[in-house]
Image (tube, rainbow, N blue to C red):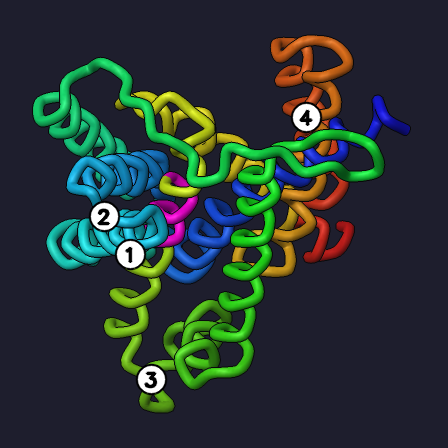
Amino acid sequence: MSQLLPIVLDSFNYMAVLLLVSIGLVLIFGLMQVINLAHGEFFLIGAYGLWLAQAAGLPFALGVVLGALAAGLVGLLAEVTVIRLMYQRPLDTILATWGLSIAIKQAITIIFGPQSQQIASPLDSAVSILGVSYSAYRLLVMVIAVAVALGVFVILYRTRFGLAARAAMVNRAMARSVGIDTRRVDRTAFAFGTALAGLAGAVMAPLMSVDPQMGFGFILPAFLSILVGGVGSPVGALWGTGLMGSSQTVMATLWNPVIAQIAVFTLAIVVIRLYPNGITGGRR
């Protein structure tokens, strides 16, 4: 039990962060059909926002909020200037967001340099769980992810905006015909989705090396998660991140990261072959 528990906790930690990134992609990809290859760079913006806040002497919690807001504002600017021209043209969004990702990464490299930055964790202590010592901050990350995920579900399923967003996901033309301002929904959803990526980057910054490449490792697993779980389904994001995140962590622990990535890609291909619309979309 003492050997298994750390693997389980690490799996939940990775799944929690992957869920934050994936929910943002669900909103953007599922609602607007935008394949956002710059999502990892919004993760990056959140981390650097926290680093700047700490350098200015601000509290950690405020730095996390500011990092998420910075990512959301950049996302809103990108939507208004570039992304709004690409709706319903998925192939064009690949090129547009790829260019956006390069621009953001180069801007950060010019401003902050290519070297890595370190962010101090607000909790250096460990917590004993069933006799196993585990990082208190990693447990806090899990709590934050669960709280944010619950908040997102409340917004999507208990508010007027959530109703409008889900209506636009199902049938955009019909949503417009009943008076829903789909442009407003698009702007809000894109900014919200990128802010979630920034939040994930900020909360993960103390556990990683903050550098211009740090977001790359999350974008592909996040896309796989929503494809496996079901595009456009927040519930599918839960299933997808659970399956992909736990598989990645367990296999990397038992074997090595290279074999783990091959195995996870293979698993994703098998699941998508059996469930082309994702697990929540039903079997073909």
| Magenta span: chief secondary structure | helix
Q: Which mark is residue 180?
A: 3
Of pointers 2 and 4, the one earlier in the residue sequence: 2
**Would you name the residue on which mark 2 appears?**
58
Q: Mark 2: few, some, or many residues within 10 Å (few <14, many ≥20)?
A: few
Find numbered disc 2 in the image and state the secondary structure of the residue it sits on: loop
Q: The magenta stretch spans which residues?
A: 194-201
Eye-nearest disc, 3 or 4 = 4
Find numbered disc 4 in the image and state the secondary structure of the residue it sits on: helix
Query: How far is mark 2 from mark 3, CA to CA?
Result: 40 Å
Query: How far is mark 1 from mark 3, CA to CA?
Result: 17 Å
| Left or right side of 190 for 168 | right
Which residue does the image show at 77% across and 39% down from the upper left?
A: 129
Above or below, comparing residue 23 to residue 219 in the picture: below
Which residue does the image show at 25% across and 52% down from the upper left?
A: 66
Query: How far is mark 1 from mark 2, CA to CA?
Result: 38 Å
Above or below, comparing residue 163 to residue 46 in the picture: below
Above or below, comparing residue 162 to residue 50 in the picture: below
Find numbered disc 1 in the image and state the secondary structure of the residue it sits on: loop
Q: Amino acid at mark 4?
A: Thr
Of pointers 1 and 2, the one earlier in the residue sequence: 2
Whether the magenta-drawn stretch holds residue 16 is answered as no
| Left or right side of 112 for 208 | right
**Would you name the residue on which mark 4 appears?**
249
Of pointers 2 and 3, the one earlier in the residue sequence: 2
**Would you name the residue on which mark 1 appears?**
87
